[in-house]
Image (cartoon, grey):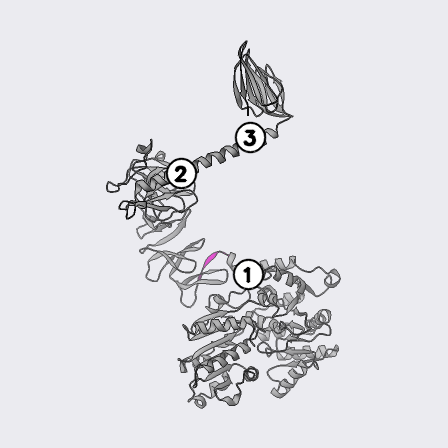
Amino acid sequence: MLRKYQHTIKHFLFSEWAQHSSIMIQMPTGTGKTHLLASVIYDHLKEGQYQCVWIVAHRRELVEQIVETVARYGISKEDGRVKVMSIQWLSRHWEDVKGDNPSLIVIDEAHHALAETYQELWLRYPNAKKLGMTATPCRLNRKGFTDLFDTLIISDSIADFIRQGWLSAFDYVSIRPNSEDQRLIDCLEKRGADGDFQVKEMDAVLNRRPSIERLYESVRQYAHGKKGIVYAVSISHARNIAEYYNNKGVNAVAIDSKTPAKLRKQMVEDFRQGKIQVLVNVDVFSEGFDCPDVEFVQMARPTLSLAKYLQQVGRGLRKTDGKETCMLIDNVGLYRLFGLPTAYRDWQAMFEGRLAGKGYPTANARNVSCMAAGQEKDEALNADGLLETIVSHRQLMDYLQSGSSLFDNNASQAEALKPYKDRQSGLWGLKQGEIITAKAQYRTVFDVKDYRAAVRFEDNRVGIVDGNGNIRIKLNRYRYMKFLPDDIGAMTDNTGHTFYIDLKTSKLYNGKPEVLKYGRIEMLRVGMVYYSRTKHVYKSPLGINSFDLVPRGFYLRIYTGLADNCKFRYIDSEDAFLHQDCVCILADDEDEYYGFCGELADGSIVITDGKGNYYHAMDGKEKQYIACEHPKTQDEDFDVAVSRLKAEAEARAAKMRENLQREKEKKQQTRLAQIQDVVPFQSGLKWGLRAGSRVIVPPIYRSIQNPVGNYCVVETNPRQWGIIRLDGKVVVEARYTNVEISNGGTAQLTVFPGITKTVNLK
């Protein structure tokens, strides 16, 4: 029975086969790739009577494992329709299979498929469907797989599978950054033919008694009595480790390529049954080894290969009953190169050859500091120990349940775009961090800014491309090009003359543009002429000045004549004559400039594109088509549409005024409530109001009486009394012979003796 995620991937696969004949699937180690391919083969064979399937692996052990798994689906070796073989056997026996015509070829551990022996399959059987299965679609040399596979299907991540319970959680410990072993590894300089550390140099540096003693001490401290796998540098290194562990009472055996097949098989079986506690191996159990109850994995082999790192730690992440967690013991500091197993991987970039499957110390510097901050502080365990705890399984689950993949390894996304040169072709490309975003294809990269680059193409023309290499602007053959502030580009020709280009509109200018900003709207001024930064560029006539450009929040009104053939209608209003022949630039509209037809009561406007179409525009919303010069319906008639808009605008304006008044009163009440403790004070011959040491009303009155509620009676001149609010606002002009305020919010004003009137102050 397939799991839900396996069914999902299988569905994607058969859907993709409708368009592509060659597909690669990425699934983490331990998530059932072999079961999935067996199910795919079973369904493929049901499609036709004459179907034939080849399964090709790169090691004999993998072939045997695949045969056993496929047999569970009722497809035995005797069936004849399915052949499982190693690539080594096949490369020596092409003549023996000459009569076969496979309809499907499955490549297990397909990250090896770039070898010439595999490529022969594509040459000999071009019509067969191809399926590549791998946990790590990457290569150290940044060589992609697109020459062989048309597309990549990516499964859930290791973090997702642990979160969902399909893979085991883990504890991760590693050597300290200033440790003796880390210093030895940092000094490794030589590289092998595959680009990884040279085995001979690693063996000379690490295959020594002190280093092996530290390996044992790490196992004793963190995995005492547990069942595990150790990854060694060389055959000699593996045998020395096994010998030392045995001398310390740990039942360990060394397995390598020279171990006889029969003995190797017996050792593996004894390990599964618990008769052997530790397997020390040299690249034997990196792929395909299936023993879910592995309780610890010890990494004693430095590597630059992401594939080797994930294949090694993956041996310990398989789930089994009673296994709470796996201890990952990193004695060579691999997490500083790769991040934790749960970190994000850009498999698509590696599949396409835009990112090498290798470790990048600088790219993981941020992750290392994050991990240090998140370490479990167990002083008794870690204070003097050889290793430090990077994360415990409980911390890991807390992070994953919160939705984090734990210090994502995607540091390149925050890094700037940079040019790089391909040594073989001499051409330039673009990359972000270590990810190639545009392959080498340019003669020159003049300048890079934000996510754009100024380049010279192979035909010697220059232009602007985005970070992915998509052409945004292509120009003639200039000698040099660079970016200026505010999205302006400068190009110099062979005579030394400089031209300028607005990168927003692609318009060229002979003089350097000055960028003018009106809120969210920008204009350019070149000499005495103004230009809009819209794709359909507005060019002003000579003679206008900055006073003719009036910003109105979400639009800019330009008082200038339009072309004689661009006539349109206006909204009837008292100031309509002022709006005639005005141009309007809308904020957030990068395409067009408009004719201005008039403003409505709520501040919204009616505009035209000059082609007979009219629109209603208001702040924060897309413009809406309302009418045209040749309406097909009554609703599209300009007068009908504008009449409706006027009524709607009046209603909105009235509501806006009400809200504004309500908000004003609310603020006023809040302000008055904060100054209820004001008292009159005298400065010289004048009086004012203050609250404590804060002056509320400056001393400008001849006299001020004590406040009554929110009001005060004030005298400006002899026998000229009025009323002010506590915040100083004049409520009643000072022209009365006497004023009295009652507690009920009214005031009695004496005009002349015997003549009074009452006013409501609220």
- Image x and y of residue 106, in percent: 48, 79
- Image x and y of residue 447, in percent: 41, 54
Instruction: Name the residue furthest top.
Output: 753
Amino acid at the residue labelled 2: Ala
Residue 186, visible in the rendered structure? no
Residue 295, visible in the rendered structure? yes
At horizontal 55% and vertical 33% (from top left) the residue drawn is 666
Instruction: Name the residue furthest left.
Output: 565
Amino acid at the residue labelled 1: Ala
Gap between marks 1 and 2, in whole Å? Answer: 56 Å
**Mark closer to the observer (3, 2):** 2
| Numbered circle sitting on residue 363 | 1
Disc 2 residue crowd, few under 14, some 14–19, many 20+, Cα 10 Å? some
At horizontal 72% and vertical 65% (from top left) the residue drawn is 385
| Residues in magenta, as a range | 415-420
**Which part of the image, by quadrant, shows the C terminus?**
top right
Instruction: Please give the residue where the numbered disc 2 appears in the rendered image.
Output: 649
Disc 1 residue crowd, few under 14, some 14–19, many 20+, Cα 10 Å? many
Gap between marks 3 and 1, in whole Å? Answer: 56 Å
**Mark closer to the observer (3, 1):** 3
Predominant SS of the magenta segment: strand
